[in-house]
Image (cartoon, rainbow, N blue to C red):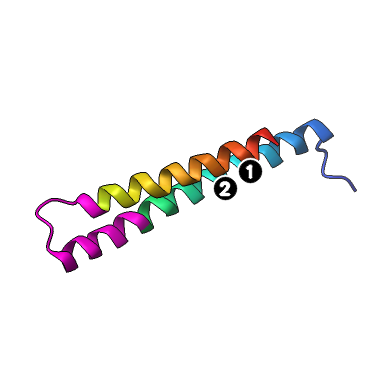
Amino acid sequence: MTSGKTPKDKKRYRAALQYSGMAVQFFGIIAISAWGGQKLDAYFDTPKPFITIFLILFFSTGYFIKLYKDLTQ
């Protein structure tokens, strides 16, 4: 017995999973870099969250570069 899904439906489902996975990865990168940045800011006793902001921007930029390379292939 078949699931009743056409190949077009399967392709859309696969694309939705791929893009939702990218969103989860991006959220994870932001969360981990923010957590690590806060820990480092507390350790070095910085007056403002400079390390947190730097880490978030650094890892986000790296992820967007990876994402661009993956999507253009």
Examine the structure image and report whether residue 39 is included in the region drawn in magenta. Answer: yes
Q: Is mark 2 on a helix, strand or loop?
A: helix
* Residue found at x 75% / y 36%: 11
Labels in figure, total: 2
The local crowd at label 2, few if under 14, some if 14 to 19, many if 20 or more residues have their Cα within 10 Å, is few
Give the Cα distance between marks 1 and 2: 5 Å
Picture quarter containing residue 38? bottom left
Going by the numbered disc 1, the residue's amino acid type is: Gln
Taking depth in this image into account, of 64 and 27 the one nearest to the observer is 64
Going by the numbered disc 2, the residue's amino acid type is: Gly
Q: For the magenta stretch, what is the residue range?
A: 33-51
Examine the structure image and report whether residue 23 is included in the region drawn in magenta. Answer: no
- Please name the predominant secondary structure of the magenta segment in the image: helix
- Whether residue 16 is visible to the viewer of this picture, yes or no, is no
Q: Name the residue under label 1.
A: 18
Q: Mark 2 points at which residue?
A: 21
Q: Do the residues labelled 1 and 2 touch (CB within 8 Å)?
A: yes
Which quadrant is home to the C terminus? top right
Give percent across and percent down for residue 71: 64, 36
- Whether residue 58 is visible to the viewer of this picture, yes or no, is yes
* Residue found at x 13% / y 58%: 46
Give percent across and percent down for residue 66: 56, 44
Please tell me whether residue 24 is drawn above or below residue 67 in the rendered image.
below
Q: Which mark is residue 10?
A: none
Give percent across and percent down for residue 7: 83, 35
* Residue found at x 27% / y 58%: 37
Using residue 22 as the reference point, say whether residue 1 is left or right of it: right
Please tell me whether residue 29 is drawn above or below residue 19 in the rendered image.
below
Picture quarter containing residue 17? top right
Using residue 24 as the reference point, say whether residue 1 is left or right of it: right
The local crowd at label 1, few if under 14, some if 14 to 19, many if 20 or more residues have their Cα within 10 Å, is few
